[in-house]
Image (cartoon, rainbow, N blue to C red):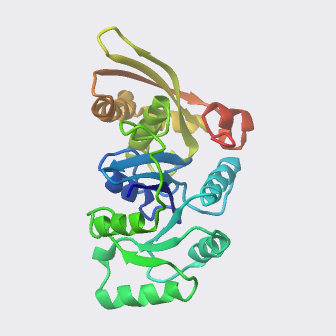
Amino acid sequence: MFKSGYVTIIGRPNVGKSTLLNNLMGEKLAIVSSKPQTTRTTMQAIYNDNDSQIIFVDTPGMHKPKHKLGEYMVNRATDSTNEVDLILFLTDSDEPGPGDEFIIEMMKHRSAPKFLVINKMDEKKPENLAQTLLAYQKLADFNEMIPISALHGKNVTRLMDLMKKYLPEGPAYYPKDIMADVQEKFIVAETVREKALRLLNEEVPHGIAVNVTSMKERPDGTLDIEVDIVTEKESHKPIIIGRGGQTLKKIGMYARQDLEHFFRTKVNLKAFVKVRKDWRDNPGFLAEYGYKKGK
């Protein structure tokens, strides 16, 4: 009996959605950062084993938007709960807050089975964890409730087994050698953005985008890639570049290492910094950088 279906992972910013996705996949596909609102658009990751194919939809964190990019992110997360076979609601709170309650209320209008997944179980005392499960159970009728540690992989295998139990019988939707339903340029842009998020201070990261301007393969398989790191403010440009170009150099070096692992070939990466004022509220820039409706 072969199981297949679509599973969306939804929750507030910075609760571990991308970390969980990477753990489930056994491969780093989604960028991970300690800063909130790291994920900006949905990405489909395709898990295969002998008896199932699961298409995971990684989503931006649900939050109150402050600009058009934020509106796009929330719309993408909400839309991801439509026409899926299973919804994973991931949280790490000890008790439901306003953000959790908003998501739960939205989920009530979806017909798919719903799991409550409490992340960071290793940081909670057993008695507190039991109280947390009861508090969320009062708000919605979840089909399953399971505590996990996305970072350390605790209970993730159990979560996978439960998902398969609820997924319908069906065919494989993708060939088994495909791990993500995204273009290679998306992987490049997100990898560079992840390194920028890790190396830059708190003020800068939310105002940057990464645009892949050139990606060419040499006869020997080497990839030549050029990207623009786009920021909203002139004052942020020297911060991204760093003293003597050191910060930009580190962003490029760490991104290149990950990209060589992903593409399994040598990568030559050149990064440039461009200023595009208020790009997060500019529909033209949003579309150019890949934040399009339906994408």
The correct choice, above or below, for 164 with respect to 38 in the image is: below
The correct choice, above or below, for 71 with respect to 214 in the image is: below
- Residue at 35% in and 63% down: 160
- Residue at 42% in and 46% down: 46
Which image quadrant for residue 24? bottom left
Q: Position of residue 245 (x, y in %)?
A: 38, 28
Q: Position of residue 165 (x, y in %)?
A: 40, 68
Q: In the depicted view, which residue is nearer to us: 66 or 17?
A: 17
Q: Quadrant of the C terminus?
A: top right
Q: In the depicted view, which residue is nearer to us: 72 or 200?
A: 72
Q: In the depicted view, which residue is nearer to us: 237 or 16?
A: 16
- Residue at 67% in and 49% down: 72
Total marks in image: 0
Q: Is residue 30 visible?
A: no
Q: Quadrant of the N terminus?
A: bottom left
Which image quadrant for residue 108? bottom right
Left or right: 217 in relation to 103? left
Farthest residue, direction top: 219
Q: Is residue 89 visible?
A: yes
Q: Position of residue 240 (x, y in %)?
A: 46, 36
The correct choice, above or below, for 293 with respect to 6 in the image is: above
Left or right: 90 in relation to 245? right
Left or right: 153 in relation to 65? left
Farthest residue, direction front: 1
Q: Position of residue 126 (x, y in %)?
A: 30, 87
